[in-house]
Image (cartoon, rainbow, N blue to C red):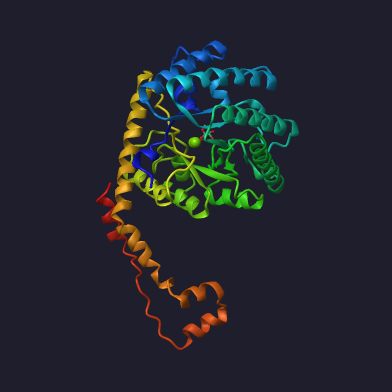
Amino acid sequence: GKRLEDHLRFAVAWWHSFAWPGGDPFGGQTFERPWFGDTMELAKLKADVAFEMFAILGQPFFCFHDADIRPEGDGFAGNTANLEEMVDYIGAKMEAVGTKLLWGTANLFSHRRYMAGAATNPDPDVFAFAAATVKTCMDATHKLGGANYVLWGGREGYETLLNTDLAREDAQLGRFMNMVVEYKHRIGFDGTILIEPKPQEPTKHQYDYDVATVFGFLKRHGLEDEIKVNIEQGHAILAGHSFEHEIALATALGIFGSIDMNRNDYQSGWDTDQFPNNGPEVTLAYYEILKAGGFTTGGTNFDAKLRRQSLDPEDLIAAHVGGMDVCAKALKSAVAMLEDGTLERLRAERYSGWDTDDSRALLNHATLEHCEECVRDRPIDPQPRSGRQERLENIVNRFV
Ligand code: 3MF
Ligand code: MG
Ligand code: MG
């Protein structure tokens, strides 16, 4: 019963648009922006510019890390004071411009204190610092009416197995995430907690590798009804999957939450965070989302950045307009594919052999011996079961 507009839940990512200076591992800052610098005054100027852009774009949402919106303070107390002041400042702007918060998150990866991990750090003080920081970011998200709270395990992984105790680090991460869920309920935050999987970068092996790995983690720690996933296109590609595979698996497992939209392609060796420009790919992603009922609390966050030669900040507007056009067009194509219904009909037909009482009994109660009885004295005539991929792809091509 949702309309197309209900799915246009676009968000601008504060970090790439306003906090990223154009650096990469081989070179530093390329952008000059009047709002760069680590003071409260500049943090407020940055917020002014951000909401100026939100007013131009008219997109409904934004997302942020604590470290994107506040200057680094003097330890935990300083960080918290700066964050709280900026939350008040941004709250007033949200009200004035009408932009809402899709999700907030904590940056538990940039500061040197996290060089050996955050929740999985062998130092209990760093674990506590990370946990306390998540508390302040959940408070900030709650106060700003955020629809979700995201955790990407940026430094939760290892560089070498030779110094790593996997069982211990899994237990620490499990406890950490249980604390997050306990706190969510204690403060009455009714948004969704989301884990964002990624297989590699910055650590050699990231624990939240992909959707399947995160589902195993959630089950192991009794969190499968509490936490969902935020799926990023580039992370899916780095894990050797497709974007639509990760979304389809998450919907199948009941843990789909939200997406980080960007573009990595077949050349990717790292997370390139380009703006989306592959219509057919985005269409297939939305097709999986719509098939499962669409977004509830989630949406489409542009976790995408300019190329570092884009010295003119106006390119930010062009990039987001282009990205939103690609997504809106893909959403229309996905809706048309669903409304047409041919693909769904063929899929249902494919499994129709199971839609008899005998077959259902086979699946639910049979033993290996029963199966043996079924086939022993009977010829089997295997059917292709609509496995005609070329036909299906032709159907998709009518819509994208
Ligand atoms: C890294 C990411 C992150 C997450 C963010 C929110 C810096 O590859 O995608 O962006 O999206 O931390 O969880
Ligand atoms: Mg992301
Ligand atoms: Mg990423």
* Image: 183 above or below 243: above
The spot of residue 313 in percent (x, y) is 38, 19
Answer with the quarter of the image where residue 107 lies. top right
Report the side of 22 relative to 175 (left or right): left
Rendering quarter of residue 202: top right
Q: Position of residue 350 (x, y in %)?
A: 37, 67
Residue 233, compared with residue 58, is above or below; it is below
Residue beneath the point at 44% across and 14% down: 32
Q: Residue furthest right?
A: 124
Q: Is residue 316 left or right of residue 336?
A: right
Farthest residue toward the left? 398
Q: Residue furthest front?
A: 1
Q: For the point 57% across and 13% down, which residue is it? A: 40
Would residue 108 be seen by someone viewing this image from the given angle?
A: no
Q: Residue furthest bottom?
A: 377
Residue visible at 55% across and 41% down in the picture: 194
Q: 120 and 320: which one is in front? A: 320
Query: Residue at the location (50% across, 50% down)?
Result: 250
Task: Give coordinates of residue 249: x percent, y percent.
Answer: 48, 53
Side of 18 where 189 appears, left or right: right
